[in-house]
Structures are given as C-alpha cells and as structure tokens.
Amino acid sequence: RTFLLEEPTVKMETKAAIAFLTLALLAFCGLGLEIALAFGIEPVIYGVEMRDWSSFQNILHWVFTCVIWTIVIVALIIFSNRKLKFDPFKKERSSMTWQWMVSLLIVIIMLGISYWDWKGFKVLKEFKYHGMPRFVFQYLYYIVETGLVYLMIAFSQKAGELLFKVKRIPYGGIFTALTWGLVHILTKGDVLIGLLCLLSSILFGVIYLLMGKDARKAFPLILIAFVF
C-alpha cells in the first residue's frame, strides 16, 4: 500500500529530473551552435576560413553568436517557468558569511590560475591584443556564454537533487565539467589547461550552491572567475 502511494511521486520526480537534465543538455547544445556558425555558415558567407577573418568579421561572429545564444537562453527560461514551474534565477536561500568567504576565496584562486595561465591578467592582455572595439564585443560574448553555463548548472543541479535527494553535492558543476569543461580539453590542445577547465566547472557549481542559487550573487562571481 505504501509503495502504491509513493510510486507516482517517484515516477513524477524522475520524469521531472529527466526534463531538467534535457534542458541542461539543450543549453550545452546551444553553446555548440557556435561551432556550426564558425566552421559551417560564416566561412561560406565571408568567403574565408575563421583563421583569416578580419576584425569586422570577428565582431560579426560574436554578434551573431550572442543573438543565437540569447534566443536559446530566453527559450529555455520560458519553458522552465511555464512547463516545469522552475525559475533558474530565483534564489533558494540567503548566504551566510562563511559561504561568501569561501566563494570569494574560490574566485581569487581561479583568478590566480588564470594569471598563471595567461602570464598576466587576461582582461588586460586581451584588451591590448584586440583593441577597444573587438574587446567590447568579445566580452559581451563572454557574458552571454556565462549565461548559458549558468543555466547548465541550474538545470542539472535541479535534476541531480530530484534523482539523488541530496542537495549539498554540486551536481551542476559536475555536469558542466563533463560537458562544457570536457570539450575544453579538446579545444585547448593542452591536457593540463583542459583539466583546469574541468576543475573550474565544478567550482562554478560550488559557488552556485554557496550563493543559495541566487543569480544576483552567483552569476557575477562565476562571470568574474571565468572572464577575468
């Protein structure tokens, strides 16, 4: 009798978890649309491969990518709110002082890793390399990319919590590491740097949990750790 009462709830939660995991995968696939754009569509439009693009063509790429990613973000948020009654930007709880301290420590460590990787501050190096116009559009691109990464973390965290009933594990960070982070091992061409991307993905998930799943706090910290 107890089993009959509990079975529908278990099935419903499993079904919801699969739905959230699907949204996380769709967010990841949304990031992958840039590959089709950069290596399939734009070379045909511009008449040259990506490595030979002009500054204007690079800016167009970032603009096109941001538009596509923004459409994906809006669509996923609308679907999540309407169909699953889940707002990925709504905070779950307030953060305690120690949680802020740990989150800021994580950001500082990640900035230190970035400094070591770039042999200087990434933001300054890219500004010097790109110049103002390209720098502005590239960092707009980074902001929108972080938005999709945030959704991957939020949706997969919810899926993990529904499946395993434990809320203290950074499922979102683990999922992001196994998708977005793992891809960076291939694209970076350096195993060590790729592994650091995996670690960064998990730490993004930890920040998300420490900040009470509050986008107003977690998103800026993840953005700073990722971009700078």
Image (spheres, helix red, strand yellow):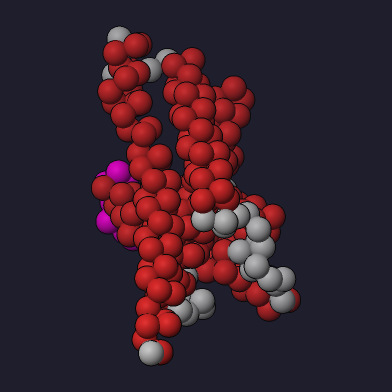
Residue 49 left/right relative to 217? left
Across and down, in percent, residue 135 comes to 57, 30
Position of the N terminus, as image quadrant, is: bottom left
Q: Is residue 87 magenta?
A: no
Across and down, in percent, residue 183 comes to 31, 49
Magenta span of residues: 187-197
Q: Which residue is at a point 51% across and 76% down the rendered structure image?
A: 167
Q: Is residue 190 magenta?
A: yes
Residue 193 left/right relative to 105? left
Q: Which residue is at a point 26% across and 47% down the rendered structure image?
A: 186
Give the answer, above or below, for where 166 lies relative to 143.
Answer: below
Q: Which residue is at a point 36% across and 86% down the rendered structure image?
A: 3
Q: Give the residue furthest to the bottom.
A: 1
User: Is residue 17 at all visible to an observer of this figure?
Assistant: no
Q: Nearer the viewer, residue 144 or 25?
A: 25
Q: Main secondary structure of the magenta part?
A: helix
